[in-house]
Amino acid sequence: MVWGIENSRELYGLKGVLNSQLFDINEKGQLVIRIKNKEIPVAELLEKHDLPGANIRVLPWIGLMIDYIAGLFIEYIKNYGYRGSFKPVYPLKVNHNDMVLTSIKRYGEKYGWGWEAGTLPEIQKALSYRTRGLFVVDGVKDLKGLEKVVMNKEAFGEAIIDIESIKEAKLLDKIREKLGEKIRVGLRIRPMFRGESIWSSSSGLTSKFGLPLSSIYKILDEQPWIRDRIVMLHFHYGSQIVTKKALEKMFTEMINTYAVLKSELLPGLKYIDTGGGLAFDYESSCSGSAYSPDYTFKEYVETMINIFKEKSKEYGIEEPDIVFESGRAIVAPHRISVAKVVDIRPYISDLTTDVELVDKIRSAKTIKELSDIARESENIINRLLSYTDNIDLKRREILEGLIETLYREITRKAKDLYLENKEALSQLEENIRMGRPLYKFLVSPSKRFVLSFSIFSILPDYVILNQYFQPVPCTKLDKKPDVLAAISDITCDSMGEISEYISSLPKGFTEIFTEKDNRLLGIPGKRVILRGIPLHLPSGDEEYYVAFLHTGAYQDPLSMSHNMINNYPEIIIDEDDKGDIIISYKDSSRDDYPL
Ligand SMILES: *Cc1c(COP(=O)(O)O)cnc(C)c1O
């Protein structure tokens, strides 16, 4: 069997509704950015200016996501006869980069996109990107910020000031005179249902955010004037809510709370701010894991609107306007982070040691037999590794060689057994499912690739929460990957390493072993976590780059400057008024230069 680019599309997740629109592989095996019927090879963008790495920003993709998601809402609202309207706002927290905000304003204008800001600097920034849309101020953290909004209120379509404590209601009362009659208030509700995501501490009765019911009563009691100004309930269950079941629970809680409060206490309610939470499929596998929702964007919209409509009918209330406040899904795709491989090292060793066990490995007839030998080998390795006292060079050489030899022989044998007899697949799968030692051998890296970047600076959420960002080689995609490799960055920090790869090969995929180190690329029809990234060994002086996809949400604001590595060069892909593509380079260590 020969490896083709279709295999690479499957292995590296360049498929599915979204990724197949954004990326492809050309006949030279290069990863390309697809835009306006053009294909731009990623590696060539970097080679052109001899960059060690860069963040590539594809600004029209922000427009693509806006059109896509707004389109789903508008269409479904119309087709389903929902009587509330769609009011999108962009939360600055997700990425406040000026190019991002300019793009949100530019592409969001026709849908009336507004802003959500929570801090004084965010409020100031949002004020410089005025739109006709809503302006949700999340919390009255200080009066200075609020006054800024109030003084600028003419500049905005509509401002809504959210309160989330009794103290904030008091603060609001202090500037009531200045607020005038127009200003409107939202209540940030503390959700009871916990959102079931990595960030679900944003919800639940002990959450940091939002008002418990008792405080709402107290506010209305102490500040009776506020009742008439309250137009919105604001919910946020945390970012990246990955299951449809969780969506159903949260939308139900939202509309139930809204309906009861509107009927019994707050007749002026008109909006539900549904917060963030729309999850992005970083794995491109729809698996329901932390970085891959089990629902589509379309299902998110349909689930929300169906529940809101049914429940509104049940309670006999008008259907609320929907404030959509997700940012992650809108901006995640627009940034691709690329880094050059500057060194390739052995993961353990390059030595070989003669050991009797090798004969036994070579004569194994089945995966089951091999699995038992792998267990024996693991025990031997663990025992040897525990003797580090008084180890001389000779012993160390034998030890390094022994471990490497066992890895090499066991993986080679597994591949041979698979090639001889495809029945071996189910045995392999069982080893993976049971977490047996053979599995560890088969998914372990044999190389360490050093990339000229800082994970702290480019992918901070990997360091903070082990967030998955899809790695894809920028060239050689017409060839089978040679090895599984751990990726190291150039910081002096052991956390600067990525060695997890999520593989979701489709059923019927047959090329499941790497070319050179005989490691597993996955199991067809299963989601498998590999302990190394499938990569190619570049030949001679060949440049080899690795891209990490979808790094546009949160990574810019959270970027750290560990080891003074920051300010990565930027390659900006934009369009002019005529819709022609323009590519420009920005490198803060040099002068800006146009291409
Ligand atoms: C973080 C945050 C958002 C954005 O959520 P995403 O799911 O990451 O898009 C929206 N609203 C509030 C209140 C937030 O704190």
Image (cartoon, rainbow, N blue to C red):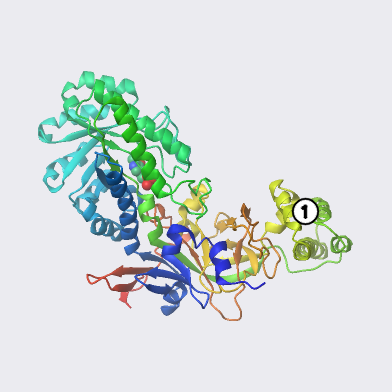
Determine the residue positioned at 40% across, 55% down: 332
Where does residue 489 sit, x and y in percent of width and height?
A: 54, 62
The three-letter code of the residue at mark 1 reads Leu
* Image quarter of residue 163: top left
Name the outermost residue toward the top: 221
Q: Is residue 139 above or below residue 107?
A: above
Q: Name the residue: 55% across, 71% down.
A: 5
**Residue found at x 68% / y 58%:** 444
In this rendering, would 553 be left or right of 402?
A: left
Looking at the figure, which quarter contains the C terminus?
bottom left
The residue under label 1 is 385
Residue 75 seen in the figure: yes
**On screen, residue 405 above or below 268:** below
Location of residue 96 with respect to 411 vertically, above or below:
above
Q: Secondary structure at mark 1?
A: helix
Taking the image as shown, residue 495 lies to the left or right of residue 410, namely: left
Residue pushed farthest bottom?
540
State which image quarter holds ligand 1: top left
For residue 160, above or below residue 526? above
357, 567: nearer the viewer:
357
Q: Is residue 517 left or right of residue 493?
A: right
Residue at image position (38%, 32%) is: 252
Q: Position of residue 284 (x, y in %)?
A: 50, 55
Percent of width and height locating residue 186: 24, 33
Quadrant containing the N terminus in the rendered view: bottom right
